[in-house]
Amino acid sequence: MPLSVVATITAKPEFADAVRQALLAVVPPSQAEAGCIQYDLHLARDNPARFVMIERWQDDATLDRHMASTHFAALGAALDGKVVGVDINRLDLLS
């Protein structure tokens, strides 16, 4: 069953550009993964340090593989110490 993920990443203001670049770098390899339906990065209009990743995955197993990928691990390392918070919501489609 497909699932959606909405991940909100809030950068420390002084690292907003570095966080943006790190997030942008993970988009192409994530979109190329088997089971990825959507993987898009957005910037909050009211906060240039808040990024929102909207994702759709074929199923939990494909999302789990994504989270175990080398590019996802590299993203975690690139964001270390540069973010105020990360909020991840896994969602099931109702309609």
Image: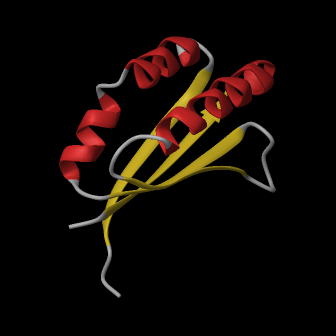
Residue 22, above or below 30: above
Residue 5, above or below 92: above
In the rendered structure, the answer to whether residue 3 lies left or right of residue 22 reads left
Residue 12 in view, yes or no: no
Observer-nearest of 61 and 16: 61
- The x, y position of residue 32, in whole percent, is 48, 41
Q: Look at the image and tell me in which quarter the N terminus lies.
A: bottom left
In the rendered structure, the answer to whether residue 11 lies left or right of residue 35 reads right
In the rendered structure, the answer to whether residue 76 lies left or right of residue 58 reads right
Observer-nearest of 13 and 55: 55
Observer-nearest of 87 and 69: 69
Residue 76 in view, yes or no: yes
- The x, y position of residue 59, in whole percent, is 23, 56
In the rendered structure, the answer to whether residue 57 lies left or right of residue 59 reads right
- The x, y position of residue 87, in whole percent, is 45, 43
Residue at the bottom extreme of this rendering: 95
Observer-nearest of 64 and 46: 64
Count every numbered label the image shows and give the total.
0
Which residue is depicted at the point 62% across and 36% down?
10
Which residue is depicted at the point 52% across and 33% down?
29
Which residue is depicted at the point 39% across and 18% down?
70
Q: Look at the image and tell me in which quarter the C terminus lies.
A: bottom left
- The x, y position of residue 60, in whole percent, is 21, 51
Which residue is depicted at the point 29% across and 26% down?
68
Colour scheme employed for the rendering of this structure:
secondary structure
